[in-house]
Image (cartoon, rainbow, N blue to C red):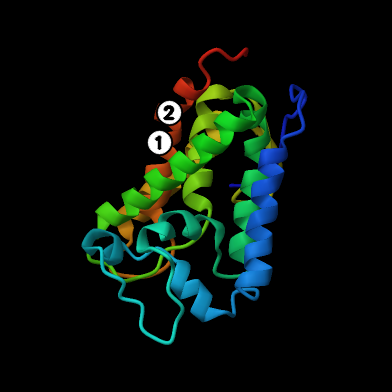
Amino acid sequence: MFPIADDNSEIRIIPFVTYAIVGLNILVFILLQGFGTNDAFTYSFSLVPREITTGTDITIPPLQHTPSIYFTLLSSMFMHGDIMHIFGNMLFLWIFADNIENRIGHFRFIIFYLVCGFAAAFGQIVMDTRSIIPMLGASGAISGVLGGYLVLFPNKQVRAIMFNFMLTTIPAFVALGLWFGFQLLQGFLSSKEQGGVAYAAHIGGFVAGVVLIKIFAIGTQE
């Protein structure tokens, strides 16, 4: 299931926080990561579980060091491995985040986004506390957005390309339910010792979004 659009008829604000997050991710990828070719920056500012759990920077010189290894909990959310990685993440963010920002407001949305990103990071860390495989990408935080969207807008229509490459419109609970089911399946089948997609981060972020969105939506109108 690959979403391409959703129903934005209820949006009454300019979701500038969503736009800013998209823009920041793109700028980091282009200017600081050099379209993914600047390994020194990428490895230094990615999140490494063993660094967080031991409090020790294991980055090998001559790579540059971050002000603090714990800063990577934040910096890793705004970095990507390649063009397809950032394209897929920004597409999901562009489609689903504006509805949540419209519902809970700009300030609450950025806090919600970051908290979900941190929850995703800790989900991946708990999966393998001694891993030295760098983790980077906005997908953990975006997974939280998807979880929040599922709770707030379960029946909102989503345009998507399905497994048979057919363009169709389905309710959000179907689209996001399929997405989350795939994360669970792949997370179960994949080895925590191999690089690739951080399924534990996706699951952790999604669960955080489901659990927290009602709190962030307190006092807002449906």
Residue wearing tag 1: 208
Does residue 95 appear anywhere in the picture? yes
Q: Quadrant of the C terminus?
A: top right
Percent x, y of residue 43: 45, 74
Label 1 sits on a secondary structure element that is: helix
Is 198 drawn above or below residue 123 in the view shown? below
**Where residue 185 sits: x, y (%)?**
37, 50
Q: Residue furthest bottom?
A: 62
**The quadrant where residue 155 appears:** top right
Q: 174 or 13: nearer the eye? A: 13
Residue 170 occupies which quadrant of the picture? top right
State the image quarter where residue 26 is shown.
bottom right
Q: Nearer the viewer, residue 136 or 84?
A: 136
Q: Which residue corresponds to the image point at 33% horizontal and 50% vertical from the top-left?
A: 122
Q: Residue at x 24, y 59 (%)?
A: 53
Residue 58 in the image, given as x and y percentages of width and height: 30, 75
Rounded to the nearest angstrom, the CA distance separating label 2 from label 1 is 6 Å
Assess whether mark 1 and mark 2 are in contact (beta carbons under 8 angstroms). Answer: yes
* In the image, residue 64 above or below residue 94: below
Q: Amino acid at mark 2?
A: Leu
Would residue 39 appear left or right of 7 to someone viewing this image?
left
Residue at the location (73% across, 29% down)?
A: 7
Q: Amino acid at mark 1?
A: Ala
- Left or right position of 215 against 49: right
**Residue of label 2:** 212
